[in-house]
Image (cartoon, rainbow, N blue to C red):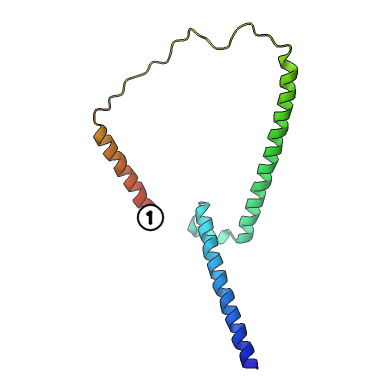
Amino acid sequence: MVNNFLQYASTKILAMMKVTELVLTDFSNLLEWFGIPGHIHSEYTPMALAQILTGFAKDVQEANTQLSSERNQGRILKKWSTGSMRRSSSSFEWRMKPNVILPVQMDDQKDFSSSLENVLELALTEQK
């Protein structure tokens, strides 16, 4: 009876250790996805990351409510001020000369594309 209990308890403990290992591996991948370097992963426990994310979500919510209230105030002010506003002249100058466009020679288009391919290949190999 004690032997069966110990075997059952040991299998449960081993299963929990495996689940913990898998979850922490996924958590490490999440930290890498957030751009946190591997050598400081130990500073970002799941609880610390949860606090950062909830703080960020609260900040976003506050900014969203502030923007919507400012937008509503802007609409009220716009309705109030547009009735009495008259334009004497436009702020856009119609006779303004366009910017001078400088010609760029692209004779060696093939060399440009091959150098771009080299840069992309170099970037991909550095990421690995």
Q: Quadrant of residue 20?
A: bottom right
| Left or right relative to 105: residue 67 | right
Other residues around mark 1 within 10 Å, as few (<14) / some (14–19) / many (≥20): few
Instruction: Pinpoint residue 51: horizontal percent, then vertical percent.
Output: 65, 54
> Looking at the picture, which amino acid does disc 1 mark?
Lys
The one of 123 and 3 positioned closer to us in this rendering: 3
State which quarter of the image contains the C terminus.
bottom left
Instruction: Pinpoint residue 83: horizontal percent, then vertical percent.
Output: 73, 13
Instruction: Pinpoint residue 79: horizontal percent, then vertical percent.
Output: 73, 19
Vertically, is 2 above or below 115? below
Is residue 93 visible from the viewing direction of this image? yes
So how many labels did they put on this image? 1
State which quarter of the image contains the N terminus.
bottom right
| Left or right relative to 112: residue 14 | right
Q: Quadrant of residue 80?
A: top right
Q: Which residue is rendered at x = 70% and y = 34% of the image? A: 68
Q: What residue does disc 1 label?
A: 128
| Left or right relative to 98: residue 28 | right
Is residue 36 visible from the viewing direction of this image? no
Q: Which residue is rendered at x = 32% and y = 43% of the image? A: 119
Q: Under tag 1, what secondary structure?
A: loop
Q: Which residue is rendered at x = 32% and y = 20% of the image? A: 103
Q: Which residue is rendered at x = 34% and y = 19% of the image? A: 102
The one of 25 and 78 positioned closer to us in this rendering: 78
Instruction: Pinpoint residue 28: horizontal percent, then vertical percent.
Output: 52, 61
